[in-house]
Image (cartoon, rainbow, N blue to C red):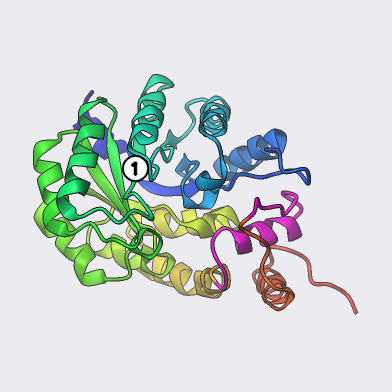
Amino acid sequence: MNYDEARKRLRGSICPVITPFREDGTIDEEAFKQLVNWQIESGSHGISVTGTSGEPSSLTIEERKRVMDMAKDTIDGRVIFTPGTGSTNHDETMELTKYAEEIGADAAMVIVPYYNRPNQEALYEHFKTVADSVEIPIIIYNIPGRTAINMEVSTMKRLVEDCPNIIGAKESNKDFEHVNRVLLHCGRDFLLYSGIELLCYPMLAIGGAGFISATANVDPKRVAALYDAWEAGDVKKAQDMHFELMPLNDVLFRDTNPTVAKAALGMMGKITPKLRLPLGLPSSEIQEEVRETLEELGIISKQLG
């Protein structure tokens, strides 16, 4: 595996695609494939599935594999593919990461285990064992707001030094000082992606590789355009896109992700806005705010009367 080549390719706006369900709770496979195609047609540079936005904890292992299969087949090599393969269970993480390698994914995104709150040494052992079991590039997914534990920079640095296939991290971490230190200690060629919507632009400014933003589920064209503008050296346009997206970024996190994004996609006619319990749709007040924001951005037509 040529990791230097992977570092060059795995960049841009990678959309963490939601998992659409029918009213009966089964996966809506046709809607899913249409979403992936729409993302690519709208300019997204990559596709991720079964990360936070994909409700992985509501899916069985076989369903997660099925979603990965559908994504890989639908993408058909047009953009990069970086599925989420992490779990709170070590053996499941191993199985899913090996499966991502087997089907030819470009990288596997492995979340810091949630709920069980491992210490830093245990985190190191978990990730090292997973990384050593495959050759596929690994992207650490650090999201302390969901996992209740933060992977410290020193732990990430050890992993990068000891595992050549750990080449990047998605940092859903509001501590921007921490994020800066990741690049300082893990290397300026370490692929750093923002998972915090309001930090997508600032992450590029310090040398980030892009972002894996839930907002791309709803407005992929604008989110990708922010990255494209930065890459083209048009700082003013990138700044403008950053602020233009801010109202949508804010409203999509009024409730737990991906509940609001699914409500928005329902209003857009892309999916049936169904979630599996224990998640549910946001309040009517939030949904009305979502509708108004989508109308203001021209994503949906304004209602008459």
Seen at 33% across and 70% down, the residue is: 174
Horizontal relation, residue 44 to residue 143: left or right: right
Seen at 48% across and 41% down, the residue is: 47
- The count of marks equals 1
Is residue 262 among the parts visible in the rendering?
yes
Q: Quadrant of residue 152?
A: bottom left
Residue found at the far top of this picture:
102
Pick the front one: 255 or 244: 255
As for residue 93 lying within the magenta part, the answer is no
Q: Main secondary structure of the magenta part?
A: loop
Is residue 190 among the parts visible in the rendering?
no
Q: Which three-letter amino acid code belongs to the residue tagged 1?
A: Val
Image position of 275 with respect to 206: above or below: above
Seen at 59% across and 39% down, the residue is: 36
Indicate the position of residue 9 as horizontal and vertical percent values.
Answer: 32, 37
Image position of 217 with respect to 301: above or below: above
Horizontal relation, residue 103 to residue 244: left or right: left
Q: Quadrant of the C terminus?
A: bottom right
Residue range corresponding to the magenta coloring: 254-277
Judge the density around disc 1: few (<14), some (14-19), many (≥20) Cα neighbours within 10 Å: many
Indicate the position of residue 62 as horizontal and vertical percent values.
Answer: 54, 28
Write down the residue under mark 1: 110
As for residue 274 lying within the magenta part, the answer is yes
